[in-house]
């Protein structure tokens, strides 16, 4: 039993180190490019000034103003120390209401119901096959809401071209449709309050030519704990 536990812990540490090494390299290669430019979605969500918020996969927090201006206390967590170093610089003016934590999103180092809301933007489609574990952890540490976005299945039509252009080819890319998101959240005891699907044209404007501009690109969701 002890030997099994030691082997399991060694395997878990090895997987964590592999994932962390990948993102450390990515943030050195592409500083500022692995964070979302679509945090404006959060402005359409009611966030109270009393809320403690956790941002999972926070990246460099370059576009975190909708959170930082409205929540009471914001904790950003990311697996990459390079991302967190940049985040620390980007939120210097908010130092009195922020914390940054390096961790694996599958094992969030926070107590149950520690936050009023958990947010994750541009991260959940890049976490591989363990996405259910990450959703379970997000649900565990929130009292009420999770707000997130994921890539839509129609993104697969152009994914091959994306993989030629960047190093995501070495990381499994997870995509969903609306029904799959509702089923996953229902399984976890969460109900959808807001779901909005953006097309590629809505996300990227004139940079996407027809007919690709009408493809569904991303699903933005706020779900509530039952």
Image (cartoon, rainbow, N blue to C red):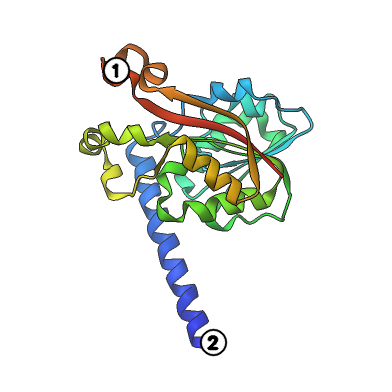
Residue placed at 70% from the left, 24% from the top? 46
Q: Are marks 2 and 1 in contact (CB under 8 Å)?
A: no
User: Which residue carries the number 2 mark?
Assistant: 2
Residue, x 41% and y 67% (percent of image)? 14
Seen from the viewer's position, the closer of residues 16 and 135 is 135
Horizontal arrangement in the rendering, residue 169 relative to residue 94 (left or right): left
* Residue in the picture at 24% in, 39% down: 163
Q: Secondary structure at mark 2?
A: helix
Query: What is the distance, in whole Å, between disc 2 and disc 1 at their CAs?
Result: 55 Å
Q: Earlier in the sequence, mark 2 or mark 1?
A: 2
Disc 2 residue crowd, few under 14, some 14–19, many 20+, Cα 10 Å = few
In this picture, residue 6 sits left or right of residue 188: left
Residue 125 is drawn in which quadrant? top left
Viewer-side residue, 13 vs 31: 13
Residue 162: % across, % down: 26, 34
Which of the numbered marks, if any, corresponds to residue 164? none
Locate residue 206, reporting x and y percent: 32, 11
**Looking at the image, residue 210 lies above or below residue 49:** above
Residue at the spot 50% in from the left edge and 73% down from the top edge: 9
Check disc 1: other Cα within 10 Å, few if <14, some if 14-19, many if 20+.
Answer: some
Residue 100 screen position, x and y as percent: 60, 44
Q: Position of residue 156 (x, y in %)?
A: 30, 36
Would you say residue 104 is visible in this rendering? Answer: no
Task: Find numbered disc 1 in the image and state the secondary structure of the residue it sits on.
Answer: loop
Judged left or right of residue 168, residue 116 is: right
How many marks are shown on the rendered structure? 2
Q: Residue furthest top?
A: 206
Residue identifier under label 1:
208
């Amino acid at each position: 039993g002890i030997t099994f536990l030691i082997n399991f812990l060694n395997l878990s540490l090895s997987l964590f180190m592999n994932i962390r090494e990948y993102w450390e390299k990515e943030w050195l290669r592409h500083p500022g490019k692995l964070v979302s430019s679509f945090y404006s979605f959060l402005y359409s969500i009611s966030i109270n000034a009393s809320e403690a918020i956790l941002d999972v996969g926070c990246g460099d927090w370059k576009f975190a103003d909708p959170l930082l201006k409205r929540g009471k206390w914001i904790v950003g967590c990311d697996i990459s120390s390079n991302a967190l170093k940049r985040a620390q610089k980007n939120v210097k003016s908010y130092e009195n209401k922020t914390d940054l934590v390096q961790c694996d999103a599958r094992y969030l180092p926070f107590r149950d119901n520690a936050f009023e809301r958990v947010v994750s933007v541009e991260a959940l489609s890049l976490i591989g096959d363990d996405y259910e574990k990450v959703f379970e952890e997000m649900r565990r540490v929130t009292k009420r809401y999770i707000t997130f976005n994921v890539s839509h299945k129609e993104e697969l039509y152009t994914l091959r071209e994306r993989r030629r252009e960047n190093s995501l080819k070495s990381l499994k890319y997870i995509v969903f449709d609306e029904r799959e998101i509702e089923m996953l959240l229902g399984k976890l005891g969460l109900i959808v309050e807001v779901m909005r699907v953006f097309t590629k044209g809505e996300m990227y404007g004139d940079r996407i030519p027809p007919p690709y501009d009408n493809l569904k690109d991303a699903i933005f969701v706020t779900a509530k704990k039952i």
